[in-house]
Amino acid sequence: PAAAWLRALRRAIATAPSLAYDYGDPRGRIELRTALSGYLGRARGVIAPPERIVITSGYVQGLALLTRVLEGGAVAMEDPGLPFHREVVRRAGGRVTPVRVDARGVRVRDLGEERAVVVTPAHQYPTGVTLHPERRRALTDWARAGGALIVEDDYDGEFRYDRQPVGALQGMAPGQVAYLGTASKTLGPALRLGWMVLPPHLVDAVADAKLHSDHHTESIGQLALAELIDSHAYDRHVRACRLRYRRRRDRLLDLLGARRVRGIAAGLHALVDVPDEAEVLARAEAEGLALGRLADHWHTPREARPQGLIVGYGTPRERLYPDALEVLAKVLDGG
C-alpha cells in the first residue's frame, strides 16, 4: 500500500525522537512492539506483551537466532517443507530431522527427543493443510513433557477464505511456543521486518544473540510500521488483500475444475496433484510460466513420493493474471 506507507513514513520521520537515529534496543523499537502486541492479540490470538517481542529483519533471521540460542541439537522440521529453511537451521548449528505431514498436519507421534520443532500450523507449506485441533493439543503436550520448543511460522495466517482466520498455536501454550511473523506476505519482503513473540525464558538470550548479530533492525521502518498499525491502515490493507486474493483463488479453482487441488482454504498458493511433475514443468517452462514442484520440498527424494505443482497466485500483476491462468490451463491440459 504505497500511499499509506508513505504517509506512515512521513509521520514517523516527523515525530521520531532524536534517539531513534542512534543505536537502538536489540529487541526493537518499543513503539512497534507495543503496536504489534495489540494487533497480534486481536488478529491472531497471540499473547504478546511488548517485553516478550523481539523485532527481526525477517523470518529467516528469527529462525537462525533461535537455533543458535538452542546451541545445536536436533530440530524437527516438516516433511515436505521449504528446503531453504532447513539450510538456515543447519548453518546456524542445528541438526535437522524430518517429521512427516499428513491430512491432519504434522504427525506428532513421530516426534522424539528433539529440542525444537518448526511448524506452519495455520496453513502448512507446501501441502496447505491446517493442523488439526487434536494435533495441536498433542504437540503442546509433547513440548511441555520434554521441555522442547515449538517454533510457529505464521507466514500467511491472516489470509483465510472459508471462515475466520485460524488462531495462532501460541495462544494455547505461550510458555512453549516461539511465534514468528513477518510483514513479507502482507507488505513485502523488501521491508525486512519480522517479529518474534518468545517464551519469557528465551527473551534475554535471543536479544543478546540479536545484539551480536546485527545490533538492531533499522528503526525508521519500525516506526512507520507502528504508525501503519496504530492508524488501522494495516488492518484495512490486510482486509483488502484478503478479498483480492480470494477472488484470485476462486478464478484459479474455476479453471482447475475437477482436478485435485489442496491447500485452497487459505494462503497465496495451491497444490495441484499431477501424475508427472517433470513433464508438466517442461511444458510450463516452454510457455514462460513459473511453477514450483513438490519434489523439491521433500527432505529425501524417493520414487514413490506424491507429485504435485505449487501454483502461487499472489505474484502476477492484476492485468497479467488472466493470461497466466490461460497458460496454466494449456500446460495442465497437455497443450
Image (spheres, helix red, strand yellow):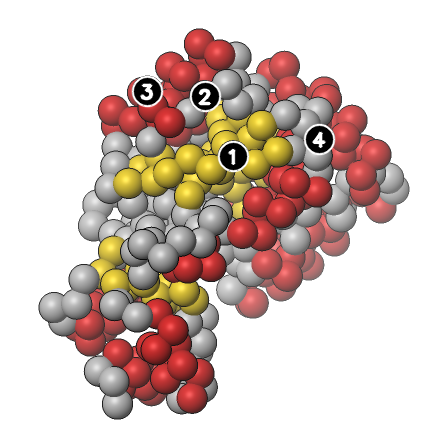
**Mark 1, secondary structure of its residue:** strand
Q: Residues within 10 Å of mark 2 (few under 14, many from 20)?
A: few
Q: Which residue lies furthest to the left in this view?
A: 258
Instruction: Evaluate whether residue 96 shows in this view.
Output: yes
Amino acid at the residue labelled 1? Thr
At a point 35% along the width and 70% down the height, the residue shown is 277
Residue that numbered label 4 is attached to: 68
CB atoms at circles 1 and 2 under 8 Å apart? yes
Residue that numbered label 1 is attached to: 97
Left or right placement of residue 51 versus residue 333 in this view: right
Left or right placement of residue 275 versus residue 79 in this view: left
Q: How far apart are marks 1 and 3 (CA)?
A: 19 Å
Q: Which of marks 3 and 4 is nearer the N terminus?
A: 4
Amino acid at the residue labelled 3? Ala
**Position above or below: 58 against 31:** below
CB atoms at circles 3 and 4 under 8 Å apart? no
**Position above or below: 61 against 141:** below
Of residues 240 and 315, the one nearer the viewer is 315
Closer mark to the observer between disc 1 and disc 4 = 1
Closer mark to the observer between disc 2 and disc 3 = 2
Q: Which of marks 1 and 3 is nearer the N terminus?
A: 1
Q: How crowded is mark 3: few (under 14 residues within 10 Å), some or many (20 or more)?
A: some
Residue that numbered label 2 is attached to: 112
Occupied quadrant, residue 64: top right
Instruction: Tell me the number on the disc at residue 138.
Output: 3
